[in-house]
Amino acid sequence: MTARRPDGRTAKIAVIPGDGIGPEVIEAAIPILDRVAAKHGFSLNWEHLPYSADHYLETKETLPEAGFRHLRDDVDAIFLGALGDPRVPGNEHARDILLGLRFKLDLYVNFRPVELLHPDLTPLRNSGTIDFVIFRENTEGQYLGRGRTSGDEHIAEEVNTGKGVERIIRAAFEWARSHGRKRVTMSDKSNAIPTHRIWQDRFKTIAREYPNIAADHRYVDALALEMVREPQRLDVIVTNNLYGDILSDLGAGLVGGLGIAASANLHPGKRNALFEPVHGSAPALAGRGVASAHRAGLNPS
Ligand code: IPM
Ligand code: MG
């Protein structure tokens, strides 16, 4: 799935290098993307923006309203490095910038491919082909940060709306259909969390519209096991925000590590899109030029 092809021959890309290893990863990625764009007959016009922990600590501003409007209205895509810094323990700048953009631009699809590019990259023995994608719901769940603390009770609420659940499931089936994929697996925890019935119900209803695609279900714990035991059986996974976050790190671990895992935040049919790696800012690795070596089988030091 890609963002809408930009009109004309130049696409304007806003870059938010962010914190930790973010800037060095972005610096390495830009020349590669320039070459890919050239191959496809257009060029990229990069605009670097300062939003980061440094910027927040200096100015007290995370993502100002004018900056948000610029990202929404004036650019063809956003390219983000990583966010997270020990000097901001509450991670409030990351919440405003990364989660804020996902929510406010309504980028409800977090598309995370898990593809084994070379057999040496996986820690599994005899894994065979690994090539599946995770459709992670990106605008609801526990990520809304709703909840409360009363006395010794710390309550985190998980929001699942019919609209939100339906549109991510549909996006997964649509993508499966347009890419010749054969199976969509929905993952929830409805055996323990009663409100996850909504996932069961919507999945069954929508699956009927796609009779040529097999629809199955795994509780998220069982899916984690299957990802390690038989990843070659997986095709398209659709799940909620938190489970998609966790499973996509596991998926990255199966194919070479977080250093090479990709993530697209999309609203199908809309221009806005935010592209980022799956990894965090890894402050301990920052500035050492070892970010991409920090993966299965390679010694980062
Ligand atoms: C990811 C990251 C983020 C998330 C963090 C940095 C808030 O782990 O994109 O997977 O949990 O969504
Ligand atoms: Mg994550």
Image (tube, grey):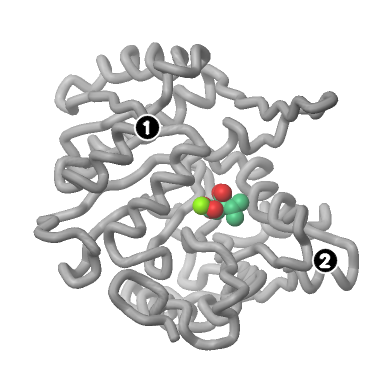
Q: Secondary structure at mark 2?
A: helix
Q: Position of residue 178 (x, y in %)?
A: 24, 40
| Residue 73 seen anywhere in this rendered image of the structure | no
Tell whether circle 1 marks a residue whose Cβ is less than 8 angstroms from ligand 2: no
Q: In the image, is residue 227 above or below residue 278?
A: above
Q: Secondary structure at mark 1?
A: helix
In the rendered image, the residue lying farthest to the right is 59
Q: Residues within 10 Å of mark 2 (few under 14, many from 20)?
A: some
Q: Residue at x 31, y 14 (%)?
A: 204
Give the numbered dot on residue 173. Answer: none
Q: Residue at x 50, y 62 (%)?
A: 279
Q: Residue at x 62, y 38 (%)?
A: 143
Q: Which residue is mark 1?
A: 220
* Residue type, label 1: Val
Looking at marks 1 and 2 on the same chain, the residue that comes earlier in the sequence is marked by: 2
Q: Which residue is mark 2?
A: 56
Q: Quadrant of the C terminus?
A: bottom left
